[in-house]
């Protein structure tokens, strides 16, 4: 296998704003009249980042990059965004929608002023007593809660030269690739049930990924689902979830079946929070999901054309006291192929809430990636500020 970086570099502009987010909770209502509302929300973050990459000789030969130290000023795991929300009550139905636009600040070094702007959410909704139907583009369901419940979602996370992430054009990956895969926003038709005794079901018909290369076909959509359970009690809460993904891509040279299950549990009591989640899949890859991993040249099938197996897990604990929240996190993904991949991240972070709209973050991160016997370890210090409205 030749260097991974030449495979990744043409895709870096596309990867710049792949990180996920959730709508800000402090949205500003711009209009609320005649059963119609319109609001806006946004988020801005910037980190000073120092990374130290240490590769063995085999990884240096694979990547073509020697050990190095690098300082950057860039955004964290979440990109900057601005979003708009709409809703209107019409009889027994409420129609609504959301559009959000994601902006990178990581363009000063090599893209000049060609700021990447992407649309990660552009959907409409219809709500009734029977639940909700969403039509449009949104984050998908497989591994969705795994990432949204991540304790360092607002932080920085893992980077490495092997994945082309240290320099300014790339982004940090949070725990993508070291605990879960990314639920790429896709065109979908998704039904969400009402909450019944704490349970809520979501089933989605999703635009399928081309995993067999040029000339392939998908005669059925991708199906994804997630069942969640929420229970609150005095001083605490429990959230549990399980999800699935299945799709098939066919071609004259072979078919690729992609299947996976995801799961997790988060428990909170007083100031303590514990998180445990994971996934198990075949034909999915181990970073960004089947379609993206295949495009990037990351393995989703082996040399015999068989789907590779991948799995990952994330273990976290946090404690909140006053305005401060301390987090310890460990995540790991593994992929079994002709050459095995392992990627793990250890993170310690402190989040300090100045007020409802401003947070400060300090984080120390160690990422270790192994491709066969080649290894790179990257140590990162990230100091940042997050402004939400």
Image (cartoon, rainbow, N blue to C red):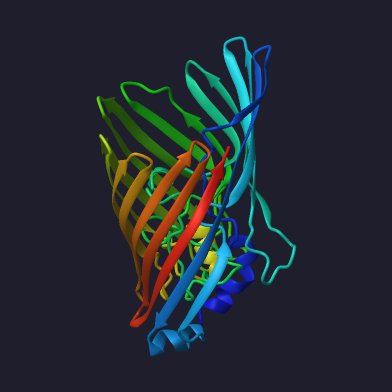
Residue 5 visible in image: yes
Measuring from the top left, give residue 1's x and y in whole percent. Answer: 46, 83
Q: Nearer the viewer, residue 81 or 92?
A: 81
Residue 224 position in % (x across, y down): 45, 42
Q: Position of residue 249 (x, y in %)?
A: 51, 57
Number of labelled discs? 0
In the current view of this chain or complex, which residue is farthest to the top?
91
Quarter where residue 226 is shown: top left
- Is 175 located above or below residue 64 in the figure? above
Q: Between residue 167 and residue 340, name the one nearer to us.
A: 167
Which is nearer the eye, 195 or 346?
A: 346
For residue 340, what is the image quadrant?
A: bottom left
Please state, as top left, top right, bottom left or bottom right, where the C terminus lies in the image: top right
Task: Judge from the rendering whether residue 165 lies leftward or rightward of residue 310; answer left or right.
Answer: right
Residue 1 visible, this angle: no
Pick the front one: 356 or 185: 356
Answer left or right for 130 relative to 82. left
- The image shows residue 164, relative to residue 363, as above or below, that is below
Residue 237 screen position, x and y as percent: 28, 31
Q: Residue at x 58, y 78 (%)?
A: 6
Task: Note whether 216 is above or below 78 in the view shown.
Answer: below
């Amino acid at each position: 296998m030749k260097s991974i970086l030449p495979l990744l570099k043409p895709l870096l502009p596309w990867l710049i704003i792949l990180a996920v987010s959730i709508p800000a909770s402090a949205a500003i209502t711009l209009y609320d009249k005649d059963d119609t509302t319109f609001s806006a929300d946004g988020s801005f973050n910037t980190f000073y980042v120092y990374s130290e990459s240490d590769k063995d000789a085999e990884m240096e030969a694979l990547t073509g990059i020697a050990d190095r130290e690098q300082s950057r000023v860039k955004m964290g795991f979440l990109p900057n965004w601005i979003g708009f929300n709409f809703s209107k009550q019409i009889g027994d139905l409420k129609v609504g929608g959301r559009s959000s636009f994601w902006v990178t600040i990581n363009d000063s070094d090599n893209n000049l002023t060609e700021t990447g702007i992407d649309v990660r959410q552009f959907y409409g909704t219809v709500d009734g007593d029977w639940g909700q139907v969403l039509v449009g583009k949104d984050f998908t369901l497989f591994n969705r809660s795994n990432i949204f419940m991540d304790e360092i979602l607002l932080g920085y996370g893992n980077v490495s030269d092997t994945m082309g992430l240290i320099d300014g054009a790339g982004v940090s990956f949070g725990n993508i690739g070291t605990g879960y895969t990314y639920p790429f926003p896709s065109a979908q038709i998704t039904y969400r049930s009402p909450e019944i005794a704490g349970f809520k079901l979501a089933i989605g018909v999703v635009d399928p990924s081309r995993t067999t290369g040029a000339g392939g076909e998908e005669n059925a959509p991708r199906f994804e689902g997630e069942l969640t359970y929420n229970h609150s009690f005095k001083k605490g809460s429990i959230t549990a979830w399980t999800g699935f993904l299945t799709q098939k891509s066919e071609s004259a040279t072979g078919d690729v079946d992609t299947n996976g299950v995801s799961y997790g549990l988060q428990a909170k009591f007083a100031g303590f929070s514990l998180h445990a989640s994971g996934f198990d899949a075949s034909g999915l890859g181990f970073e960004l999901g089947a379609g993206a991993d295949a495009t990037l040249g990351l393995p989703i099938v082996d040399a015999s054309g068989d789907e590779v197996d991948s799995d990952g897990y994330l273990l976290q604990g946090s404690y909140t006291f006053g305005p401060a929240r301390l987090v310890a996190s460990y995540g790991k993904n593994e992929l079994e192929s002709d050459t095995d991949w392992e990627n793990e991240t250890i993170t310690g972070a402190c989040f300090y809430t100045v007020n409802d709209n401003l947070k400060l973050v300090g984080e120390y991160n160690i990422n270790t990636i192994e491709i066969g016997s080649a290894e790179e370890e990257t140590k990162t210090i990230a100091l940042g500020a997050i402004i939400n409205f």
